[in-house]
């Protein structure tokens, strides 16, 4: 085997994010990550002034000739509830738009149905055919190691298509994901939703036509017509309507640990009654059983960390958990191959061995190395641990350090 230098991942001195982060992340010369640096800005923001700015903005978009004032892309989660809650406080009439990827938990579906009733709002769904969803799961898992690409592409495409179709210019998102996680932008930037952010980050740089091409390669054909709802509107159509996507986190202090209990009390939002395996939170991703589960396990496979790292990092910044407690949760949870894999394998018709063979192809050599045909990585507590059998062939193994020689 080729003798490549063993990976040396480092971690933020404050939170739990590694240098291998999937979210754009930088470290200063003291070892503090950009996510923590940006989170510190929250305390310095004049939120009363931001609220006034929001009030002025929504008045500009309050509709005079359309029944709807704005569109809110929603999954039915606690953040969706809070987005609607804030918009309704200003007397606006939103149209809710949901991409339904067929992975809802039972409680997630209850929350979705309850949301429309308690807020008395209209709600548009897009639910692709199950056969198409199964094909997209298989194709995208092979192509990019992300069986849920269809869902990311759906929620960041279909609502914009609806906005163009119904001529509703204002779109209201919750928080900017990579800004919240990794400090991709400053709170002083007032970043808005863009096609570039959608394409390069949310969709991994892939588009509908890449999926069609890959489906032919993997003998799991998907037609152009089947992918229409994942095709982003043209610039001309966007400009005609003046579609604009704003983030509420630029105008209101965003704290999911406060929003969740508030939505439970006010509107009957329900958290999961079944504990998750890969995170300690009970309100996370109830719209998709695989987001906290086997989809997130693929992030562990690729980058060496998972949902527990994401959640503890956020909670450290809000003083909800200590870094010592966070490390215990991470070591306990991040590596777990969760039970929802059984559902997914049956769903797409794969064996677990087939899944493992495909998954190993996406390991990052900056994170993982091979010893005695086992995967090893360095964890946040500084220890090097073994994490299972290697499924790669000898040629594929060459890019990984191997102490067995």
Image: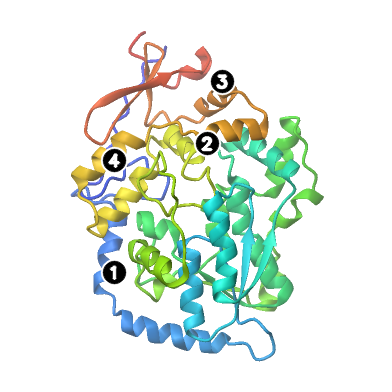
Picture quadrant where residue 99 is located: bottom right
Q: Which numbered marker is on residue 353?
A: 3
Given this view, does label 4 or label 2 mark the residue nearer the observer?
2
Which one is earlier in the sequence, the residue at label 4 or at label 3? Answer: 4
The residue positioned farthest toward the top in the image shown: 405
Picture quadrant where residue 325 is located: top left
Q: Nearer the viewer, residue 333 or 105?
A: 105
Whole-angstrom CA distance, mark 4 to mark 1, is 26 Å
Whole-angstrom CA distance, mark 4 to mark 3, is 28 Å
Q: Nearer the viewer, residue 145 or 81?
A: 81
Quadrant including the C terminus = top left
Q: Position of residue 312 (x, y in %)?
A: 30, 49
Q: Is there any visible trace of residue 26 in the rendered image?
A: no
Which one is earlier in the sequence, the residue at label 1 or at label 3? Answer: 1
* Residue identified by numbered label 4: 329
Binning the other alpha carbons within 10 Å of mark 4 as few (below 14), some (14 to 19) or many (20 upward) gives: some
* Residue identified by numbered label 2: 340
Which one is earlier in the sequence, the residue at label 4 or at label 1? Answer: 1
Mark 1: secondary structure: helix
Whole-angstrom CA distance, mark 2 to mark 3, is 15 Å
The answer to the question of whether label 4 and label 1 lie on touching residues, with beta carbons closer than 8 A, is no
């Amino acid at each position: 085997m080729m003798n490549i230098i063993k990976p040396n991942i480092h971690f933020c001195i404050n939170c739990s994010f590694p240098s291998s982060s999937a979210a754009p992340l930088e470290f200063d010369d003291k070892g503090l990550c950009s996510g923590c640096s940006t989170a510190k800005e929250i305390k310095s923001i004049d939120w009363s002034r931001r609220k006034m700015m929001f009030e002025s903005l929504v008045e500009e978009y309050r509709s005079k000739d359309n029944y709807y004032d704005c569109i809110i892309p929603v999954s039915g989660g606690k953040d969706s509830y809070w987005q609607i809650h804030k918009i309704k406080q200003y007397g606006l009439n939103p149209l809710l738009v949901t991409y339904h990827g067929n992975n809802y938990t039972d409680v997630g579906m209850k929350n979705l149905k309850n949301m429309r009733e308690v807020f008395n709002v209209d709600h548009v769904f897009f639910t692709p055919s199950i056969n198409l969803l199964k094909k997209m799961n298989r194709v995208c898992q092979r192509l990019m190691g992300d069986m849920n690409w269809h869902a990311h592409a759906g929620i960041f495409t279909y609502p914009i298509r609806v906005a163009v179709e119904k001529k509703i210019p204002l779109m209201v998102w919750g928080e900017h994901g990579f800004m919240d996680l990794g400090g991709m932008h400053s709170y002083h930037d007032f970043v808005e939703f863009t096609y570039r952010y959608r394409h390069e980050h949310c969709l991994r740089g892939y588009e509908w036509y890449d999926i069609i091409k890959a489906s032919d390669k993997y003998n799991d054909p998907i037609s152009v017509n089947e992918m229409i709802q994942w095709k982003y509107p043209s610039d001309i159509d966007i400009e005609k309507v003046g579609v604009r996507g704003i983030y509420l986190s630029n105008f209101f202090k965003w704290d999911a640990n406060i929003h969740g209990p508030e939505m439970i009390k006010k509107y009957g939002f329900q958290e999961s009654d079944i504990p998750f395996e890969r995170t300690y939170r009970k309100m996370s991703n109830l719209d998709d059983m695989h987001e906290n589960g086997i989809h997130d396990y693929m992030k562990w496979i690729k980058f060496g960390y998972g949902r527990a790292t994401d959640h503890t990092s956020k909670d450290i910044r809000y003083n909800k958990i200590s870094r010592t407690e966070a490390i215990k949760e991470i070591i306990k949870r991040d590596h777990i191959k969760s039970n929802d894999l059984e559902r997914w394998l049956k769903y797409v018709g794969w064996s677990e061995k087939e899944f493992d063979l495909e998954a190993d192809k996406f390991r990052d050599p900056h994170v993982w190395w091979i010893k005695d045909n086992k995967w090893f990585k360095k964890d946040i507590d500084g220890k090097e641990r073994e994490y299972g059998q290697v499924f790669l062939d000898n040629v594929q193994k060459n890019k990984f350090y191997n102490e067995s020689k």
